[in-house]
Structures are given as C-alpha cells and as structure tokens.
Image: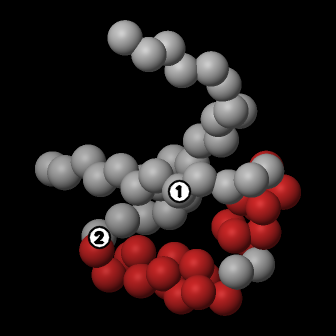
Amino acid sequence: GYTIVAKTEFASLADMRWYDDECPAHAKLKALVPEFGLNPPEDIMSIYFEPGHVAVL
C-alpha cells in the first residue's frame, strides 16, 4: 500500500477547524476520498501541532 502525507499550515486551531468543517473547496476534496479506496474517518488522520522552536544544526 501507500502512505500519503499532505502538510498544511494554519494560523490557529480555529482556522484548521474551519477548513476541515466549513470550507467549500475542502468539502469537494473530501467527497472524492472514497473514489481512491479510502474509508474516512478510519483511513484519514489529521494532527494539529502547536508552533515551536526548531533547532538549527
């Protein structure tokens, strides 16, 4: 199988929730998911990370 990762950055958790729950364009994308053999929500995972310090080597 395949694992696909898409990274999207939002200014806040509220913005991410709007995108996931209310954005018309994202709703159209989510409607296509079953055509690729995925069964949401079991096959989809969203993770919200708080901004933090990243070390520079």
Across and down, in percent, residue 29 comes to 48, 81
| Residue for point 29% across, 70% down | 37
Q: Does residue 8 appear anywhere in the picture?
A: yes
How crowded is the residue under tag 2: few (<14 C-alpha within 10 Å), some, or many (20+)? Answer: few
| Residue for point 66% across, 25% down | 52
Across and down, in percent, residue 16 comes to 72, 59
Q: Is residue 23 left or right of residue 31?
A: right
**Alpha-carbon span between mark 1 and mark 2:** 23 Å
Across and down, in percent, residue 7 comes to 46, 52
Up-down relation of residue 55 to residue 52 (above or below) = above
Task: Spot the residue most to the left.
Answer: 1
The front one of 50 and 30 is: 50
| Residue for point 58% across, 79% down | 26
| Residue for point 66% across, 88% down | 24
Q: Is residue 40 left or right of residue 16?
A: left
Mark toward the start of the polypeptide (1 vs 2): 1
Numbered circle sitting on residue 8: 1
Up-down relation of residue 56 to residue 29 (above or below) = above
